[in-house]
Image (tube, helix red, strand yellow):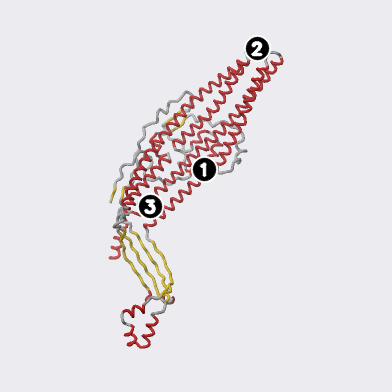
Amino acid sequence: MAAAGLCALLAAMAAGCAVGPDFQAPEPQAPAQYNDPARQADGASRVTMQSEPDPRWWRGFGDPVLDSLVERAVAGNLTLQMAVLRIAQGRAQTQAVGAAGLPSVSATASYNRQLLGLKGIVQSRGLDDTLREEGGSEAAGALDALDRPVGLFQVGFGASWELDLFGRVRRAAESSEARTQAAAESRNDALVSLQAEVAQTYAQLRGAQALRRVLDSQLDSARQTLALTQDRQQSGLASALDVANQSAQVAQLEARLPGADMQAQQARNALAVLLGQAPGVLDAELAAPAAVPAAPPEVPVGVPASLARRRPDVRQAEATLHAATAQIGASIAEMFPDLSLSGQFGSRATEADYLGRWASRFWSVGPSVSLPLFQGGRLVANVRLARAQQAEAALAYRQTVLDALRDVENALVAYRSDQSQRLALGRAVQEGERAHGLALDAYRAGLGSFLDVLSAETRLEQARQAAVRADLQVTTDLVAVYKALGGGWQDDAAAGAAPPPVGTPGNAGLAAPAQDRP
């Protein structure tokens, strides 16, 4: 009964209480809706808050090549793999910190050759002469043996257990676990950035290829106009100046072709590196031109309050705040007594054959208490430091939430504005084609000047190239919207299972005042 009562008492003491503040998940501080997300021009993609964005948002572009590139990048990107290894490091660190609160058992074995100095002890007590007189030669021999070195064999087991009455180890383990969660969210953030970068780079590739097709079409048209001008010059209906101006127009278009090819090749090289491969590996696969991925008719963005559940950087800031809060408790616990239990059991003898005998056993068991009396202000300074770091982490969390809201608002504004610009440029291309056709017909009939043709051709060229860049910009803007919304890491099939969240996800704002508990 006594042993059972002692075990129960030790278990209760070990459970103890953890000093310092308990972490409270931050409360959301976000507007009810984004700043007029539904204000769209006619014919533009519509933004809606009625549903959450698809975790596999890149599939909304309807491009199987893009889908394949994103999936291969998630599997092969080296930067993402390094982020995963940082999570593994954090988990190992958490396990090591938590192990300090568990009993530790070790086995020992030793052999020492030593001179014990026993003869000097006997002589210092004045027993040397007495023993020699009473014991004769046998006693004298035993006394002389005390002055010779002996070998001491020892084997045994040792155990120790820090009871962690005030939660120092538990708070340290809690802080380490929160830092591991922050590393996991950092990996998720890297994943979101990777998916967005692959989509944007792929769009740039298709944009460069589309620009090359536009340049080729314009170059064919310019060469036909040049041939027409040369024919009219030979008939005396056009001047050499007209031919020279059109030749310059053709040369300018030819000069732009290498730039478009360079942009396409650089995009292919960038995609290969994002997939963890050497530049040039994707050249054959991506050589065939294709259209810039088009935006879907409807873009769901969810409500602002859901950002804290999706944005990995907000979740990382929350985990960092959790770690800083737990560290306060760990620093406060260092100011309280430290109670440990330790024990030893083993066997020692001067001859190895005697180690197995019960008479050679030894043991010791007992508690030890360590109480810091004077540390020169170090412990108090550590508590102040931990509290200051927690306050800084709370402010960093608030700033991260504000940055997330700003990123989404700016991305939506750019998406709306660039869609309006693209629609206007589409109309400009239509009118430019009409003006160019009218000017060319009038020139053929001798009713218009070549300057009208050249001017119309230049405006049409500029409008077509601007329209290609506008298509690319709208797609890039939509990718930026998805990146700002923070989607892409939640889907297990696409991103891998994320570690469980720390605290309660989905909250934004400053943490509620933490309450200390004894």
Give the foreground label among 3 and 2: 2
How far is mark 3 from mark 2, CA to CA?
88 Å
Gap between marks 3 and 1 measured at Cα: 31 Å
Q: Amino acid at mark 3?
A: Ala
Name the mark on residue 55. Answer: none
What percent of the width, then of the height, locates residue 148? 41, 79
Q: Residue at x 47, y 42 (%)?
A: 190
Q: Which residue is mark 2?
A: 446
- The answer to whether residue 54 shows anywhere in this view is yes
Upstream in the sequence, badge 3 or badge 1?
Answer: 1
Give coordinates of residue 13: x percent, y percent. 30, 58
Residue 468 lies in what quarter of the image?
Answer: top right
- What residue is disc 1 on? 74
At mark 3, the secondary structure is helix
Q: Residues within 10 Å of mark 2 (few under 14, many from 20)?
A: few
Q: Which residue was labeled with disc 3? A: 173
Please name the amino acid that badge 2 sits on.
Gly
Along the polypeptide, which appears first: circle 3 or circle 2? Answer: 3
Say above or below: 163 vs 232. Answer: below
Amino acid, disc 1: Val
Q: Quadrant of the N terminus?
A: bottom left
Residue 318 is situated, as x and y percent measured from the top left of the image, at: 38, 43
